[in-house]
Amino acid sequence: MEINFNPKKNVKITDYLNSYLFDNILIKNLKGISIRRKIVKNWYEIPLFKLGIKKELTLKLTNKTSKSFITLKDYNAFWYTKQAQKLFFENVLKTKFQITKNYIEFLWHGKQIKLFYDSEKQFYNSTFLIKEQFFEEEYAWLDVNNNVVVDIGANVGDTAIYFSLKGAKHIYAYEPYPYSYKIALKNINLNNLKNVVSILNEGCGKGQTILIDEMYENNIATNIKNFKSGKTIKLETLDNIVTRFKIKDAVLKLDCEGSEYDVILTASEYSLRSFKQIIIEYHYGYKNLLEKLKNSGFEVKIRRPTFHLENDRTIKNLQRGILYCKRIPKRVN
């Protein structure tokens, strides 16, 4: 994936300063302390261990077990384990949480939901998505009830399941990576939603094709990459999607790890206005997206960016936030 603009100039300087000082330092630390207090009885010893004041840490967990660490690496790795995740879901989110060999089951608004995983990496990937989509409800702003949804960046089908349970008429879900696409198919079938969700092993962008290694285990932060060999994957334009599925007055969700710029900036005004609501997770700033959407007749609200460094990307520095876009009716003279 490539971008033809400077991400640092695609946000305001005040966004950069505020998000780094406030979000990345203050909020993350406060949130972490709040969570640990609900899982660890002696949570107050954790900062001492992190600062090197305590040379060994024994966590006294709320399930009456304990876990000891002598390195910070092992301590950090613990929070990715099944034991820690089960404690998080049951103590923090207050939901029933079952783990079997290949499945996670949890209860959400009285509905039993099941997700497949086939590795430790994919297990944590799925638990992160469950928290974000079902309990933080990242996309609650969208009115999907009885509406068609185009879901670009479907990953393992988590958002498609969420939209289905929120009453969507039909979801067209795009996931370019074959690994996640196969898991998404399993998850849609596990939850008996194949009549409501169409999962497509395609990406979105400028309309070209790329090669993707079918064995490559992508994660939630993997952007589009062109491999030397693999399966040919189509990157569909938004104009073609609108034509292909006769989209009108639908809802668009975009979380495609940087490809949102190709999708939105190359789209016609007609295609954009085929959606009454658009929600975009931007990854390299928002100014160019904001200009395009406002010129196409949308009211846009911005959730300011937070900044991240992630290694599984061709472009390392993320300036990530959300755009909430609502179509403004055209005046009739």
Image (spheres, grey):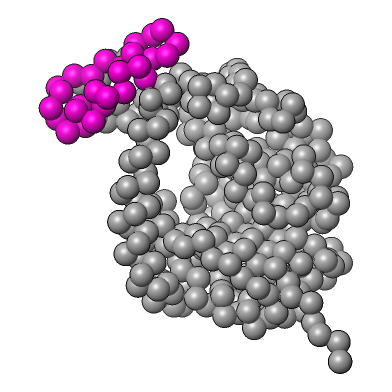
Residue 48 covered by magenta stretch? yes
User: Would residue 277 be seen by someone viewing this image from the given angle?
Assistant: yes
- Residue at 56%, 71% (x, y): give it: 261
- Front residue of 297/171: it is 297
Residue drawn where x is 45% and y is 11% of the image: 63
The one nearer the camera, 263 or 142, is: 142
Q: Position of residue 265 (x, y in %)?
A: 60, 77
Q: Is residue 229 left or right of residue 69?
A: right
Outermost residue, bottom side: 333
Examine the image and state in which quarter residue 79 appears: top left
Q: Is residue 195 above or below residue 108?
A: below
Q: Position of residue 20 (x, y in %)?
A: 32, 58
The quadrant holding residue 164 is top right
Image position of 206 (left or right of 59): right
Question: In x, y percent, where is residue 61?
Answer: 38, 15
In percent of width and height, residue 54 lies at: 15, 23
Residue 41 within the segment the image draws in magenta: yes
- Say which of 9 and 41 sits in front: 41
As drawn, the residue found furthest toward the top would be 64
- Is any atom of residue 206 visible in this view? no
Magenta segment, which residues? 40-66
Compared with 328, 61 (above or below) is above
